[in-house]
Image (spheres, rainbow, N blue to C red):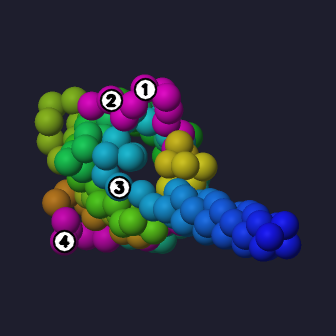
Amino acid sequence: MKNMKKGNIVVTVFFFTALLMSLAATASAQDEGTCSAAGVAGKWGYTETGTVFAPPSGAPVPFASVGRYTLDRDGNLLGTRVGIVGGTIQPATVVKGTARVNSDCTGTITIGLYDESGNLRNSVVKALVYVDNAREARAIITSISVGPPGGPSVPTVITMNARKLFPNSDNEQ
């Protein structure tokens, strides 16, 4: 009888240990690598640096910008930025656009850059990845068009680093 109870205890301990390990693995797998529009919503600050190959000569010109945007749960983006192209400061620009987020934490941002009078200056598409539990993002500009999408293309090599301004604010709108 004692051996039978001892055997039952060993089996029970083994069963609960295996169950706990499988639940921990499942919880860990669910936490890893999933992003959503709601998860990346919030206020962001960013910098961009790189090179613009100025038309018509294609001469390389240094570029940098700093800005801020708000991304809502529906993927709508609104913000501002100040840029420098070849040492010349561009005035503040209104940034409007949309973002698409994939569950693997990759996505795209499509934006329009508007001057202070509301005129569309450039259309930009960025490929990005969210990192550090969607508190940061890294991006590269994949296309810039003068004016609306489909306008004359401007070759660039520009990267972006972004960080959530208030990462613990429960994804404010």
Q: Is residue 170 magenta?
A: yes
Q: Which residue is mark 4?
A: 150
Q: Are marks 1 and 2 in contact (CB under 8 Å)?
A: yes
Look at 31% across and 52% down and name the residue there.
37
For the residues labelled 3 and 2, the Cα–Cα distance comes to 14 Å
Disc 1 residue crowd, few under 14, some 14–19, many 20+, Cα 10 Å: few
Residue range in magenta is: 149-173
Q: Are marks 2 and 4 in contact (CB under 8 Å)?
A: no
Q: Amino acid at mark 3?
A: Ser
Instruction: Tell which of 99 and 90 is nearer to you.
Output: 99
Q: Amino acid at mark 1?
A: Ser
Look at 66% across and 63% down and name the residue there.
16
Q: Which residue is mark 1?
A: 169
Disc 4 residue crowd, few under 14, some 14–19, many 20+, Cα 10 Å: few
Q: Are marks 4 and 3 in contact (CB under 8 Å)?
A: no
Looking at the image, residue 103 sits to the left or right of residue 150; the answer is right
Q: Are marks 3 and 2 in contact (CB under 8 Å)?
A: no
Q: Amino acid at mark 4?
A: Gly
Number of marks present in the image shown? 4
Secondary structure at numbered mark 4? loop
Q: Which residue is mark 2?
A: 172
For the residues labelled 4 and 3, the Cα–Cα distance comes to 29 Å
Q: Which residue is mark 3?
A: 36
Position of residue 162 measured from the top left corner of the image (x, y, whole percent): 52, 44
First of labels 2, 4 by sequence position: 4
First of labels 1, 4 by sequence position: 4
